[in-house]
Image (spheres, rainbow, N blue to C red):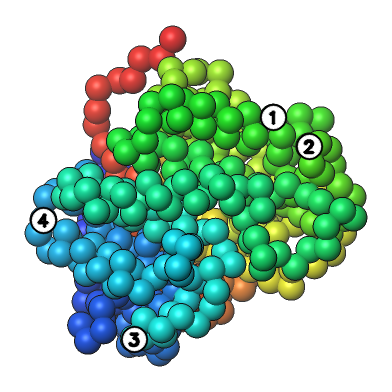
Protein backbone atom coordinates (compact mmCIF):
# COMPACT_ATOMS: atom_id res chain seq x y z
CA UNK A 1 0.00 0.00 0.00
CA UNK A 2 2.81 2.40 0.86
CA UNK A 3 4.35 2.18 -2.62
CA UNK A 4 0.97 2.84 -4.23
CA UNK A 5 0.42 5.78 -1.89
CA UNK A 6 3.69 7.35 -3.06
CA UNK A 7 2.76 6.88 -6.73
CA UNK A 8 -0.50 8.76 -6.20
CA UNK A 9 1.16 11.49 -4.16
CA UNK A 10 3.82 12.08 -6.81
CA UNK A 11 1.23 12.24 -9.58
CA UNK A 12 -0.83 14.77 -7.61
CA UNK A 13 2.02 17.08 -6.64
CA UNK A 14 4.42 16.54 -9.51
CA UNK A 15 2.02 16.51 -12.44
CA UNK A 16 -1.64 17.36 -11.97
CA UNK A 17 -1.57 20.30 -9.54
CA UNK A 18 1.29 22.04 -11.41
CA UNK A 19 -0.75 21.77 -14.63
CA UNK A 20 -3.65 23.72 -13.14
CA UNK A 21 -1.37 26.19 -11.37
CA UNK A 22 0.33 26.97 -14.68
CA UNK A 23 -2.61 27.07 -17.07
CA UNK A 24 -5.92 27.82 -15.35
CA UNK A 25 -5.38 31.14 -13.59
CA UNK A 26 -6.89 34.15 -15.41
CA UNK A 27 -4.48 36.93 -14.45
CA UNK A 28 -6.49 39.57 -16.31
CA UNK A 29 -10.09 39.18 -15.15
CA UNK A 30 -9.82 36.78 -12.22
CA UNK A 31 -11.15 33.29 -11.71
CA UNK A 32 -10.04 30.21 -13.57
CA UNK A 33 -9.97 29.00 -17.13
CA UNK A 34 -11.19 25.41 -17.33
CA UNK A 35 -11.43 24.93 -21.10
CA UNK A 36 -7.87 23.75 -21.60
CA UNK A 37 -6.48 21.78 -24.51
CA UNK A 38 -4.08 18.88 -24.24
CA UNK A 39 -1.09 21.17 -23.68
CA UNK A 40 -3.00 23.56 -21.41
CA UNK A 41 -3.80 26.17 -24.06
CA UNK A 42 -7.09 27.99 -23.36
CA UNK A 43 -9.64 27.23 -26.09
CA UNK A 44 -12.67 28.95 -24.53
CA UNK A 45 -12.85 31.66 -21.88
CA UNK A 46 -16.35 31.08 -20.41
CA UNK A 47 -16.36 30.37 -16.68
CA UNK A 48 -18.62 27.80 -15.08
CA UNK A 49 -19.48 28.47 -11.46
CA UNK A 50 -19.55 24.86 -10.37
CA UNK A 51 -16.02 24.36 -11.72
CA UNK A 52 -14.83 27.62 -10.17
CA UNK A 53 -16.12 26.46 -6.79
CA UNK A 54 -14.53 23.05 -7.21
CA UNK A 55 -11.12 24.56 -7.94
CA UNK A 56 -11.38 26.90 -4.95
CA UNK A 57 -12.19 23.85 -2.82
CA UNK A 58 -9.30 21.83 -4.25
CA UNK A 59 -6.60 24.38 -3.51
CA UNK A 60 -8.05 25.33 -0.13
CA UNK A 61 -8.21 21.64 0.80
CA UNK A 62 -4.60 21.04 -0.18
CA UNK A 63 -3.69 23.99 2.03
CA UNK A 64 -5.82 22.69 4.91
CA UNK A 65 -5.01 18.99 4.77
CA UNK A 66 -1.67 18.54 3.06
CA UNK A 67 0.60 21.55 3.54
CA UNK A 68 0.01 25.25 4.31
CA UNK A 69 1.62 26.45 1.09
CA UNK A 70 0.91 30.11 0.44
CA UNK A 71 0.73 29.55 -3.33
CA UNK A 72 -2.17 27.12 -2.82
CA UNK A 73 -4.03 29.53 -0.57
CA UNK A 74 -3.42 32.38 -3.02
CA UNK A 75 -4.79 30.25 -5.84
CA UNK A 76 -7.96 29.49 -3.85
CA UNK A 77 -8.42 33.17 -2.92
CA UNK A 78 -7.98 34.17 -6.56
CA UNK A 79 -10.96 32.08 -7.65
CA UNK A 80 -13.08 32.98 -4.63
CA UNK A 81 -12.64 36.70 -5.26
CA UNK A 82 -14.02 36.33 -8.80
CA UNK A 83 -16.93 34.20 -7.59
CA UNK A 84 -17.74 36.64 -4.80
CA UNK A 85 -17.85 39.62 -7.19
CA UNK A 86 -19.80 38.10 -10.07
CA UNK A 87 -21.12 34.62 -9.30
CA UNK A 88 -24.57 35.18 -7.71
CA UNK A 89 -27.90 36.68 -8.69
CA UNK A 90 -29.80 39.10 -6.44
CA UNK A 91 -31.30 36.21 -4.44
CA UNK A 92 -27.94 34.60 -3.74
CA UNK A 93 -28.27 31.77 -6.26
CA UNK A 94 -25.11 30.92 -8.19
CA UNK A 95 -25.19 31.31 -11.96
CA UNK A 96 -24.28 28.34 -14.11
CA UNK A 97 -21.85 30.28 -16.29
CA UNK A 98 -20.32 33.71 -16.86
CA UNK A 99 -18.20 35.17 -19.62
CA UNK A 100 -14.53 35.86 -19.03
CA UNK A 101 -15.21 39.29 -17.54
CA UNK A 102 -17.88 38.01 -15.16
CA UNK A 103 -21.10 38.87 -17.02
CA UNK A 104 -23.83 36.22 -16.55
CA UNK A 105 -24.40 33.86 -19.46
CA UNK A 106 -26.62 31.09 -18.07
CA UNK A 107 -29.15 31.49 -15.26
CA UNK A 108 -28.78 29.65 -11.91
CA UNK A 109 -30.86 26.67 -13.02
CA UNK A 110 -28.44 24.08 -11.66
CA UNK A 111 -28.12 23.65 -7.91
CA UNK A 112 -24.72 22.03 -8.34
CA UNK A 113 -23.22 25.50 -8.78
CA UNK A 114 -24.47 26.22 -5.26
CA UNK A 115 -23.21 22.90 -3.90
CA UNK A 116 -19.65 23.47 -5.04
CA UNK A 117 -19.67 27.15 -4.15
CA UNK A 118 -20.53 26.24 -0.57
CA UNK A 119 -17.85 23.55 -0.57
CA UNK A 120 -15.26 26.00 -1.86
CA UNK A 121 -16.06 28.81 0.55
CA UNK A 122 -16.39 26.37 3.44
CA UNK A 123 -12.87 25.07 2.82
CA UNK A 124 -11.59 28.63 2.41
CA UNK A 125 -13.13 29.61 5.75
CA UNK A 126 -11.30 26.70 7.35
CA UNK A 127 -8.06 27.97 5.81
CA UNK A 128 -8.45 31.67 6.69
CA UNK A 129 -11.07 31.84 9.47
CA UNK A 130 -12.52 34.87 7.67
CA UNK A 131 -16.18 35.29 8.63
CA UNK A 132 -17.09 36.51 5.15
CA UNK A 133 -16.23 33.16 3.61
CA UNK A 134 -18.08 31.27 6.32
CA UNK A 135 -21.20 33.39 5.82
CA UNK A 136 -21.19 32.81 2.06
CA UNK A 137 -20.89 29.05 2.64
CA UNK A 138 -23.69 28.96 5.21
CA UNK A 139 -26.06 31.20 3.24
CA UNK A 140 -25.53 29.11 0.12
CA UNK A 141 -26.11 25.92 2.06
CA UNK A 142 -29.38 27.31 3.43
CA UNK A 143 -30.40 28.08 -0.16
CA UNK A 144 -29.61 24.49 -1.14
CA UNK A 145 -31.82 23.12 1.63
CA UNK A 146 -34.64 25.48 0.63
CA UNK A 147 -34.41 24.35 -3.00
CA UNK A 148 -33.94 20.70 -2.10
CA UNK A 149 -37.35 19.48 -3.28
CA UNK A 150 -37.36 21.52 -6.49
CA UNK A 151 -33.72 22.09 -7.33
CA UNK A 152 -34.32 23.83 -10.67
CA UNK A 153 -37.15 26.01 -9.44
CA UNK A 154 -38.54 28.20 -12.21
CA UNK A 155 -36.15 26.54 -14.67
CA UNK A 156 -37.67 23.07 -14.21
CA UNK A 157 -38.96 21.91 -17.59
CA UNK A 158 -40.79 18.83 -16.28
CA UNK A 159 -44.58 19.01 -16.47
CA UNK A 160 -45.82 18.50 -12.89
CA UNK A 161 -48.08 15.67 -11.78
CA UNK A 162 -47.59 13.09 -14.53
CA UNK A 163 -44.28 11.48 -13.72
CA UNK A 164 -42.76 13.18 -10.68
CA UNK A 165 -39.45 11.56 -9.81
CA UNK A 166 -36.80 11.87 -7.13
CA UNK A 167 -33.22 12.20 -8.41
CA UNK A 168 -30.17 10.64 -6.79
CA UNK A 169 -27.63 13.41 -7.47
CA UNK A 170 -28.49 15.83 -4.66
CA UNK A 171 -28.69 13.34 -1.75
CA UNK A 172 -25.43 11.86 -3.03
CA UNK A 173 -23.72 15.26 -2.93
CA UNK A 174 -25.28 16.17 0.42
CA UNK A 175 -23.78 13.03 1.93
CA UNK A 176 -20.37 14.52 1.18
CA UNK A 177 -21.31 18.14 1.92
CA UNK A 178 -22.55 17.19 5.38
CA UNK A 179 -18.98 16.30 6.36
CA UNK A 180 -17.32 19.08 4.35
CA UNK A 181 -19.34 21.76 6.16
CA UNK A 182 -19.39 20.20 9.61
CA UNK A 183 -17.05 22.86 11.00
CA UNK A 184 -19.53 25.61 10.00
CA UNK A 185 -22.95 24.19 10.80
CA UNK A 186 -24.95 23.56 13.95
CA UNK A 187 -24.21 20.09 15.29
CA UNK A 188 -27.86 19.03 15.43
CA UNK A 189 -28.38 20.10 11.81
CA UNK A 190 -25.39 18.05 10.70
CA UNK A 191 -26.47 14.98 12.66
CA UNK A 192 -30.00 15.16 11.27
CA UNK A 193 -28.78 15.72 7.73
CA UNK A 194 -26.39 12.78 7.91
CA UNK A 195 -29.14 10.41 9.01
CA UNK A 196 -31.46 11.82 6.35
CA UNK A 197 -29.04 11.38 3.45
CA UNK A 198 -27.97 7.91 4.59
CA UNK A 199 -31.61 6.85 4.62
CA UNK A 200 -32.25 8.39 1.22
CA UNK A 201 -29.19 6.88 -0.46
CA UNK A 202 -29.29 3.46 1.17
CA UNK A 203 -33.04 2.90 1.56
CA UNK A 204 -34.85 5.03 -1.02
CA UNK A 205 -32.65 4.86 -4.13
CA UNK A 206 -31.13 1.48 -3.30
CA UNK A 207 -33.44 -1.37 -4.28
CA UNK A 208 -32.52 -4.50 -2.28
CA UNK A 209 -34.38 -6.83 -4.67
CA UNK A 210 -31.93 -6.00 -7.45
CA UNK A 211 -29.03 -4.76 -5.34
CA UNK A 212 -28.90 -1.65 -7.51
CA UNK A 213 -29.05 2.09 -6.89
CA UNK A 214 -31.26 3.86 -9.42
CA UNK A 215 -30.74 7.41 -10.63
CA UNK A 216 -34.46 8.23 -10.45
CA UNK A 217 -37.33 6.69 -8.48
CA UNK A 218 -40.98 7.56 -7.95
CA UNK A 219 -41.76 9.94 -5.09
CA UNK A 220 -42.60 6.97 -2.85
CA UNK A 221 -39.27 5.32 -3.70
CA UNK A 222 -40.74 2.72 -6.03
CA UNK A 223 -39.38 1.76 -9.45
CA UNK A 224 -40.45 3.78 -12.50
CA UNK A 225 -40.42 1.75 -15.71
CA UNK A 226 -39.35 4.66 -17.94
CA UNK A 227 -36.15 5.93 -19.56
CA UNK A 228 -35.39 7.91 -16.41
CA UNK A 229 -36.42 5.17 -14.00
CA UNK A 230 -34.39 2.44 -15.72
CA UNK A 231 -31.28 4.63 -15.87
CA UNK A 232 -28.18 3.35 -14.11
CA UNK A 233 -25.01 5.38 -13.61
CA UNK A 234 -22.41 3.01 -12.12
CA UNK A 235 -20.01 5.90 -11.47
CA UNK A 236 -22.55 7.78 -9.35
CA UNK A 237 -23.24 4.68 -7.30
CA UNK A 238 -19.55 3.96 -6.71
CA UNK A 239 -18.71 7.57 -5.80
CA UNK A 240 -21.66 7.69 -3.39
CA UNK A 241 -20.46 4.53 -1.70
CA UNK A 242 -17.14 6.05 -0.65
CA UNK A 243 -19.11 8.97 0.77
CA UNK A 244 -21.14 6.40 2.70
CA UNK A 245 -17.96 4.71 3.91
CA UNK A 246 -16.68 8.04 5.20
CA UNK A 247 -19.94 8.48 7.10
CA UNK A 248 -19.64 4.91 8.37
CA UNK A 249 -16.21 5.72 9.81
CA UNK A 250 -17.52 8.94 11.36
CA UNK A 251 -20.47 7.10 12.94
CA UNK A 252 -18.45 4.01 13.87
CA UNK A 253 -20.95 1.99 11.83
CA UNK A 254 -19.36 -1.16 10.43
CA UNK A 255 -22.66 -2.35 8.96
CA UNK A 256 -22.93 0.82 6.84
CA UNK A 257 -19.35 0.35 5.62
CA UNK A 258 -19.96 -3.29 4.71
CA UNK A 259 -23.22 -2.53 2.90
CA UNK A 260 -21.52 0.27 0.97
CA UNK A 261 -18.75 -2.06 -0.15
CA UNK A 262 -21.25 -4.72 -1.28
CA UNK A 263 -23.20 -2.16 -3.34
CA UNK A 264 -20.02 -0.74 -4.90
CA UNK A 265 -18.71 -4.19 -5.83
CA UNK A 266 -22.00 -5.06 -7.50
CA UNK A 267 -21.94 -1.75 -9.42
CA UNK A 268 -18.47 -2.58 -10.69
CA UNK A 269 -19.59 -6.05 -11.76
CA UNK A 270 -22.55 -4.85 -13.82
CA UNK A 271 -20.83 -1.66 -15.00
CA UNK A 272 -17.59 -3.21 -16.25
CA UNK A 273 -17.18 -3.66 -20.00
CA UNK A 274 -15.99 -7.25 -20.34
CA UNK A 275 -15.10 -6.78 -24.01
CA UNK A 276 -12.92 -3.67 -23.91
CA UNK A 277 -12.42 -2.94 -20.22
CA UNK A 278 -13.45 0.14 -18.29
CA UNK A 279 -16.75 1.17 -16.76
CA UNK A 280 -19.76 2.11 -18.87
CA UNK A 281 -21.11 5.64 -18.36
CA UNK A 282 -24.84 4.79 -18.48
CA UNK A 283 -26.87 1.58 -18.62
CA UNK A 284 -30.53 0.61 -18.75
CA UNK A 285 -31.41 -1.77 -15.91
CA UNK A 286 -33.46 -3.96 -18.26
CA UNK A 287 -30.84 -4.04 -20.98
CA UNK A 288 -32.79 -1.71 -23.25
CA UNK A 289 -30.98 0.91 -25.37
CA UNK A 290 -30.18 3.86 -23.08
CA UNK A 291 -31.39 7.25 -24.26
CA UNK A 292 -27.94 8.77 -23.60
CA UNK A 293 -25.98 8.40 -26.83
CA UNK A 294 -22.71 8.62 -24.87
CA UNK A 295 -23.68 5.59 -22.76
CA UNK A 296 -20.65 3.49 -23.74
CA UNK A 297 -17.97 6.15 -23.33
CA UNK A 298 -15.36 5.71 -20.63
CA UNK A 299 -15.13 8.86 -18.49
CA UNK A 300 -12.33 10.01 -16.21
CA UNK A 301 -14.43 10.77 -13.14
CA UNK A 302 -16.13 7.37 -13.12
CA UNK A 303 -12.82 5.54 -13.01
CA UNK A 304 -10.95 7.75 -10.55
CA UNK A 305 -13.91 7.72 -8.14
CA UNK A 306 -13.94 3.93 -8.39
CA UNK A 307 -10.25 3.94 -7.43
CA UNK A 308 -11.06 5.98 -4.31
CA UNK A 309 -13.94 3.69 -3.39
CA UNK A 310 -11.95 0.48 -3.74
CA UNK A 311 -8.94 1.98 -1.93
CA UNK A 312 -11.16 2.83 1.04
CA UNK A 313 -12.86 -0.57 0.98
CA UNK A 314 -9.50 -2.35 0.88
CA UNK A 315 -7.95 -0.15 3.57
CA UNK A 316 -10.91 -0.29 5.97
CA UNK A 317 -11.70 -3.99 5.78
CA UNK A 318 -8.96 -5.82 3.89
CA UNK A 319 -11.64 -7.01 1.45
CA UNK A 320 -9.85 -9.12 -1.17
CA UNK A 321 -12.36 -8.36 -3.92
CA UNK A 322 -11.85 -4.65 -3.30
CA UNK A 323 -8.08 -5.10 -3.53
CA UNK A 324 -8.39 -6.99 -6.83
CA UNK A 325 -10.73 -4.37 -8.24
CA UNK A 326 -8.42 -1.55 -7.12
CA UNK A 327 -5.46 -3.09 -8.92
CA UNK A 328 -7.56 -3.77 -12.03
CA UNK A 329 -8.87 -0.19 -12.05
CA UNK A 330 -5.40 1.20 -11.39
CA UNK A 331 -4.03 -0.63 -14.44
CA UNK A 332 -6.86 0.48 -16.74
CA UNK A 333 -7.04 4.08 -15.52
CA UNK A 334 -3.33 4.89 -15.49
CA UNK A 335 -2.80 3.27 -18.91
CA UNK A 336 -5.73 5.00 -20.61
CA UNK A 337 -6.41 8.37 -18.94
CA UNK A 338 -2.98 9.62 -17.88
CA UNK A 339 -1.28 11.78 -20.54
CA UNK A 340 2.40 10.82 -20.61
CA UNK A 341 3.42 13.92 -22.57
CA UNK A 342 1.60 17.06 -21.45
CA UNK A 343 0.47 16.60 -17.86
CA UNK A 344 -2.99 16.05 -16.30
CA UNK A 345 -5.30 13.31 -17.53
CA UNK A 346 -7.63 12.85 -20.47
CA UNK A 347 -11.33 12.88 -19.66
CA UNK A 348 -13.16 11.16 -22.49
CA UNK A 349 -12.42 7.81 -24.11
CA UNK A 350 -14.50 5.84 -26.58
CA UNK A 351 -15.66 2.36 -25.70
CA UNK A 352 -12.41 0.80 -26.92
CA UNK A 353 -10.44 3.02 -24.54
CA UNK A 354 -9.06 5.35 -27.22
CA UNK A 355 -8.90 9.09 -26.51
CA UNK A 356 -12.09 10.64 -27.84
CA UNK A 357 -11.38 14.26 -26.83
CA UNK A 358 -7.84 15.25 -25.95
CA UNK A 359 -8.88 18.24 -23.84
CA UNK A 360 -7.77 18.46 -20.21
CA UNK A 361 -10.71 20.60 -19.09
CA UNK A 362 -13.93 22.06 -20.42
CA UNK A 363 -17.51 22.74 -19.40
CA UNK A 364 -17.70 19.59 -17.28
CA UNK A 365 -14.11 18.66 -16.46
CA UNK A 366 -12.06 20.90 -14.20
CA UNK A 367 -9.57 20.83 -11.35
CA UNK A 368 -11.49 18.40 -9.16
CA UNK A 369 -12.04 14.68 -9.77
CA UNK A 370 -8.49 13.75 -10.79
CA UNK A 371 -6.63 15.70 -8.08
CA UNK A 372 -9.23 14.85 -5.41
CA UNK A 373 -8.97 11.16 -6.26
CA UNK A 374 -5.17 11.21 -6.28
CA UNK A 375 -5.22 12.92 -2.88
CA UNK A 376 -7.81 10.52 -1.46
CA UNK A 377 -5.99 7.39 -2.63
CA UNK A 378 -2.63 8.73 -1.47
CA UNK A 379 -3.97 9.48 2.02
CA UNK A 380 -6.05 6.30 2.23
CA UNK A 381 -3.19 3.95 1.37
CA UNK A 382 -0.40 5.65 3.31
CA UNK A 383 0.70 3.88 6.50
CA UNK A 384 -1.48 4.90 9.43
CA UNK A 385 -2.68 3.57 12.79
CA UNK A 386 -5.31 0.89 12.31
CA UNK A 387 -8.87 2.21 12.54
CA UNK A 388 -10.82 0.32 15.17
CA UNK A 389 -14.51 -0.12 14.44
CA UNK A 390 -16.96 -1.79 16.76
Distance in Å between CA atoms under marks 4 and 3 = 28 Å
Between circles 4 and 3, the one closer to the viewer is 3
Say whether residue 174 is left or right of residue 271. Answer: left
User: Which residue position holds label 1?
Assistant: 203
Question: Is mark 1 in CB contact (under 8 Å) with mark 2?
Answer: yes
- The answer for how far apart the CA atoms under marks 1 and 3 are is 45 Å
Q: Give the secondary structure at mark 4.
A: loop
The percent position of residue 62, horizontal first and vertical second, equals 23, 52
First-in-chain label (1 vs 3): 3
Up/down of 350 relative to 212, above or below: below
Crowding around mark 3 (Cα neighbors within 10 Å: few <14, some 14 to 19, many 20+) is some
Q: Residues within 10 Å of mark 2 (few under 14, many from 20)?
A: some
Residue 69 numbered tag: 4
Judged left or right of residue 240, residue 316 is left
Where residue 248 appears, x then y in whole percent? 47, 25
Q: Nearer the viewer, mark 4 or mark 2?
A: 2
Instruction: Give the quadrant of the N terminus.
Output: top left
Q: Callout 1: helix, strand or loop?
A: helix
Q: Quadrant of the C terminus?
A: top left
Residue at which label 2 appears: 221
Mark 1 or 3: the one toward you: 3
Residue 101: image tag: 3
Who's the residue at 69% across and 29% down the image? Answer: 203
Q: How many marks?
A: 4
Residue at mark 4 to residue at mark 2: CA–CA distance: 46 Å
| Contact between labelled residues 1 and 4, with CB atoms less than 8 Å apart | no
Q: From where the camera sits, is residue 7 visible?
A: no
Amino acid sequence: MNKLSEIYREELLGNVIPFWMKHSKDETHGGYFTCLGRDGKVFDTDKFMWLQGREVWMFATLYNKLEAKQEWLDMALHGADFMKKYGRDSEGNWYFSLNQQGKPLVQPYNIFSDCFATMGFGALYEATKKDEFGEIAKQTFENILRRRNNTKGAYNKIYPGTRDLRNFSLPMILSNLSIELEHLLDKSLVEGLIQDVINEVMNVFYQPESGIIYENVNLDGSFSDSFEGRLLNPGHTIEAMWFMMDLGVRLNDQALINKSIDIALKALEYGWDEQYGGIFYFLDCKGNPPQQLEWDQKLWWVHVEALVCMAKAWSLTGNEAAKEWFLKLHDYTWNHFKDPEHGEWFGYLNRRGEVLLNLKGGKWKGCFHVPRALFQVYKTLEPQPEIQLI
